[in-house]
Image: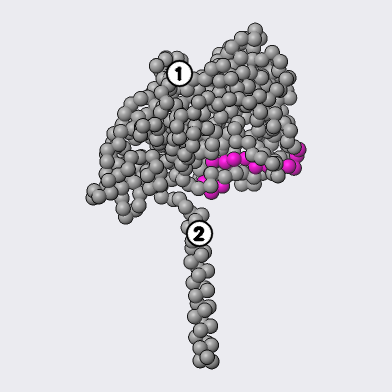
């Protein structure tokens, strides 16, 4: 089903394969479920709206809507959407504000029916793979699990793949196995897909194997850095612009009626709808100045960031006094600048467990961007440069991308060390035998 709004034509994702693919393309962000209780943070919503409108008007400012800093709601509707022209995914969420805002009663949220086991992986595209002469390189372990089995008696082994994207469009690829590289390639048809989707180096391609051997293909654009926009706009108090999305929320909350939100994971990973359980557990932890904390981070070989809390104060005390949205200042060990985070995005070191749901995974800047830090420091959502997951669709998992042939670097280092140690031992025993053999 297609709909047309102010932001262009959008399509509702309805069938099972596309729904699985949608979640895989969203990364590790939290998506609410129908019947779940969540805290809605208007301040975080305002940041996303600011980024969306800043792309069109660089002089925009955010007005003061006099909303509470957080509103306890129940989720009554969730629709997975995709933009027809750009393949950008977003979700339409319908919330109902609860009358008792202070009664934090934790209830078990029964998950919806999950389909059969699925397998998915993502691939970070290189400049060669997005060039006119390029193909898509896929490590053997992912192709073996996601694609139909090749006839290895052929020289070279090959087959034609038919995959479906979020628009429901089918794409045809030639799938070849290269024995000398022990890897798989998508050749014929790949350039057509790259050009049609306007893919660039740094974007990601996601594959999902669905039921009955179906294969889905999706994309995830490289996320732009908007931290400077959010910081600037959140500290302004002028009222020269009307943000319709927040104005509608103000009216709905005032009369106690339903209201609708759009969440764009590609625009900003600020999850402004937080599960009630995640929030309650976060406020029970110690976030005093000097506390050592860690946050999940979307960096190969470095699954978490570590830092120290250096402050705890309102980011906007005029419009959002007492708000917990990005109220904590953290000095990360690997960065020069101090960043603001929400309490539920971080975990004090030594805490008994790590909450994954409701914690965004932020992309770090490119090497050329350092020391200009990224947004806030994710998805999944990383220990290696290869990502693959086989599970029932619990989609709040760390997702990462594989990049070219650079994988298993940690294991390679261990292997080199083992070979060197064996060589030293062999030389030692040879020396002992050479010295003591005449004596025997």
Tell me the distance, in whole angstroms, between the alpha carbons under discs 2 and 1: 49 Å
Q: Which one is in front, 269 or 358? A: 358
Location of mark 1 (residue): 7
Q: Residue furthest bottom?
A: 439
Q: Quadrant of residue 277?
A: top right
Magenta-drawn stretch contains 296? yes
Q: Are marks 2 and 1 in contact (CB under 8 Å)?
A: no
User: What residue do we see at 70% from left, 41% from top?
Assistant: 351
Q: What label does residue 413 carry, if any?
A: 2
Q: Is residue 248 above or below residue 388?
A: above
First in sequence: mark 2 vs mark 1: 1
In the rendered structure, the answer to whether residue 60 lies left or right of residue 14 reads: right
Q: Which residues are magenta?
A: 288-302
Which colour scheme appears in the figure? Answer: one colour
Q: Quadrant of residue 326?
A: top right
Q: Residue furthest left?
A: 155
Label 1 Cα crowd, 10 Å radius (few <14 / some 14-19 / many 20+)? few
The percent coordinates of residue 155 (x first, y second) are 23, 50
Q: What label does residue 131 carry, if any?
A: none
Q: Residue furthest top?
A: 255
The percent coordinates of residue 422 (x first, y second) are 50, 70
Nearer the camera: disc 2 or disc 1: 2
Q: Is residue 156 above or below residue 24?
A: below
In the rendered structure, the answer to whether residue 68 lies left or right of residue 411 reads: right
The percent coordinates of residue 336 (x first, y second) are 63, 44
């Amino acid at each position: 089903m297609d709909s047309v709004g102010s932001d262009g034509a959008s399509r509702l994702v309805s069938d099972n394969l596309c729904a699985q693919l949608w979640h895989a393309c969203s990364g590790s962000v939290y998506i609410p479920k129908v019947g779940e209780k969540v805290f809605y943070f208007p301040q975080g919503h305002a940041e996303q709206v600011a980024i969306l409108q800043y792309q069109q008007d660089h002089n925009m400012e955010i007005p003061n809507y006099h909303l509470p800093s957080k509103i306890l709601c129940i989720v009554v509707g969730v629709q997975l959407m995709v933009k027809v022209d750009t393949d950008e995914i977003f979700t339409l969420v319908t919330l109902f504000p609860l009358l008792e805002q202070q009664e934090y009663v934790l209830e078990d949220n029964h998950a919806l029916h999950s389909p059969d086991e699925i397998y998915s992986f993502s691939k970070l595209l290189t400049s060669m793979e997005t060039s006119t002469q390029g193909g898509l390189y896929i490590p053997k372990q992912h192709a073996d699990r996601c694609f139909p089995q090749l006839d290895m008696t052929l020289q070279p082994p090959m087959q034609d793949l038919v995959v479906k994207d979020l628009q429901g469009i089918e794409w045809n690829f030639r799938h070849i196995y290269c024995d000398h590289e022990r890897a798989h390639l998508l050749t014929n048809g790949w350039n057509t897909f790259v050009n049609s989707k306007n893919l660039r180096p740094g974007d990601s391609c996601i594959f999902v194997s669905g039921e009955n051997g179906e294969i889905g293909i999706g994309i995830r654009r490289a996320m732009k850095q908007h931290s400077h926009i959010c910081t600037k706009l959140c500290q302004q108090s002028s009222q020269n612009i009307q943000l319709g999305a927040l104005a509608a929320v103000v009216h709905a909350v005032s009369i106690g009626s339903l209201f609708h939100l759009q969440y764009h994971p590609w625009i900003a990973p600020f999850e402004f709808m937080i599960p009630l359980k995640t929030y309650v557990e976060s406020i029970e932890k110690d976030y005093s100045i000097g506390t050592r904390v860690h946050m999940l981070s979307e960096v190969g070989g470095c699954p978490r960031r570590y830092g120290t809390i250096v402050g705890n104060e309102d980011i906007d005390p005029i419009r959002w006094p007492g708000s917990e949205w990005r109220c904590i200042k953290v000095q990360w060990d690997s960065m020069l600048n101090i960043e603001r985070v929400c309490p539920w995005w971080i975990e004090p070191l030594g805490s008994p467990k790590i909450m994954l749901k409701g914690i965004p995974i932020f992309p770090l800047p490119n090497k050329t961007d350092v020391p200009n830090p990224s947004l806030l420091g994710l998805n999944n959502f990383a220990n290696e440069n290869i990502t693959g997951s086989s599970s029932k669709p619990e989609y709040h998992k760390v997702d990462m991308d594989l990049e070219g042939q650079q994988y298993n670097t940690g294991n390679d280092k261990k292997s080199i060390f083992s070979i060197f140690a064996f060589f030293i031992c062999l030389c030692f025993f040879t020396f002992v035998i050479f010295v003591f053999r005449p004596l025997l």
